[in-house]
Amino acid sequence: MSQAGSEGAGQATMRVAVVGGDGIGPEVIDQGLRVIDAAGVTLETERYELGGSRYLADGTILPDSVLDEWRGFDAIYLGAVGTPGVPPGVIERGLLLKMRFELDLYINRRPFRTDSHDFVVIRENTEGSYAGEGGFLRKGTAHEIATQGSVNTRMGAERCIRYAFDLATSRRNHLTLVHKTNVLTFSGDLWQRAFDEVAEEYPGVETAYNHVDAASIYFVQDPQRYDVIVTDNLFGDILTDLGGAVSGGIGLAASANLNPARTGPSMFEPVHGSAPDIAGQNKANPIAAIMSGAMMLDFLGAGDAAERIERACEACVSTEGSTVAIADAVIAKL
Ligand code: IPM
Ligand code: MN
């Protein structure tokens, strides 16, 4: 499997924990691994059976012992998790968010590229309304109260904003903050001040600000205006589905959950979910998973292989056919 020109040569083999997950997850991840191998990069992989099916089978979600093992890996490559019959939040909070929080994957990087636009959303990935602050009072009564707070630390906003500025300097030197400062006058104010202060360190980067509702219009009507966007966790979640929808569909949308400080592994997964309705039918588009694999290689230092995979995927965005056939087409273009 180790081939001439392998980027693994001269450096330690990358150790990757692989979570196929549920539904179409394992199918698309298998193709991602095939493409990485075909690109000449040798990975040392270890499989973990986790997700909704595992939870239904024996109650396991994400044991701390597994998290501890993962701290010794270079990356985690994940398909999708989610199974009908599991209550909302169990797998999302217990697995995905636990990974993001415990491994401090504070950047969620989601690129969107077509013939006509090319932008990246940098989503804060550990705070905001995802933090889990809140609770019930008088649950189940007519006077029930539910609160769900949004946690915004200066440190959390600032490290995310700084990452986005750095990224902008390696691209077209343009960064847009997206928030809702006209209504969220506490969290919005913190984000805006952090943004303005960090901006002073990057005089070469042109900045802009959009409210999130207006940004939703621009995503559809004028996405060319964007280079890099930085935003909070929930706005980023919603906007990146929209980004996928206006960039060839969610079947193409890749995502990296990064710990840029490299105090542990980063996690790479397609934006899409487990799509149980088409699972096991060799129908799912593997491009998003393959592109997420390319982001993993890039982050781990195999930039040339990552770029070849990316270009091959771009040549196959309109390819139709089975999961395996689309991966075959990508491999043929490498
Ligand atoms: C995503 C997903 C997750 C999120 C869910 C599954 C927890 O929608 O990665 O965008 O909301 O972040
Ligand atoms: Mn989402």
Image (cartoon, rainbow, N blue to C red):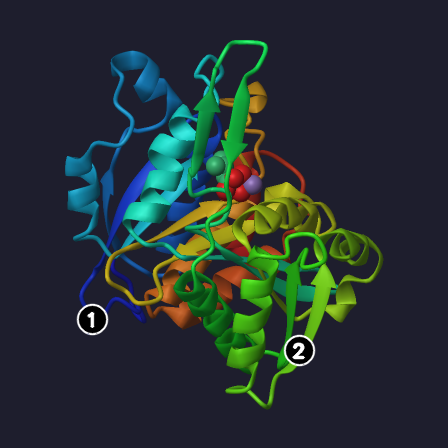
Quadrant position of the N terminus in the picture:
bottom left
Can residue 188 be seen here? yes
Marks 2/1: CA–CA distance: 39 Å
Badge 2 amino acid: Thr
Left or right of residue 144: residue 126: left
Left or right of residue 306: residue 171: right
Front in this rendered view, residue 322 or 25: 25
Front in this rendered view, residue 242 or 27: 242
Q: How many marks?
A: 2
Front in this rendered view, residue 225 or 145: 145
Q: Work out which residue is located at the far top of the displayed protein and give it.
A: 141
**Residue, x 27% and y 55% (percent of image)?**
265
**Residue, x 63% and y 36% (percent of image)?**
321
Q: Circle 1 sits in a helix, a strand or a loop, which is it?
A: loop
**Residue 87, quarter of picture:** top left
Disc 1 crowd, CA 10 A, few/some/many (<14, 14-19, 20+)? few
298 lies above or below 173: above
Residue 111, percent from left and from top: 58, 59
**Residue, x 63% and y 58% (percent of image)?**
112
Badge 1 amino acid: Gln
Mark 1 vs ligand 1: CB under 8 Å?
A: no
Label 2 or label 1, whichever comes before in sequence order: 1
The residue where tag 2 is placed is 207
Ligand 2 position by quadrant: top right
The residue where tag 1 is placed is 11
Q: Work out which residue is located at the far bottom of the displayed protein and give it.
A: 203
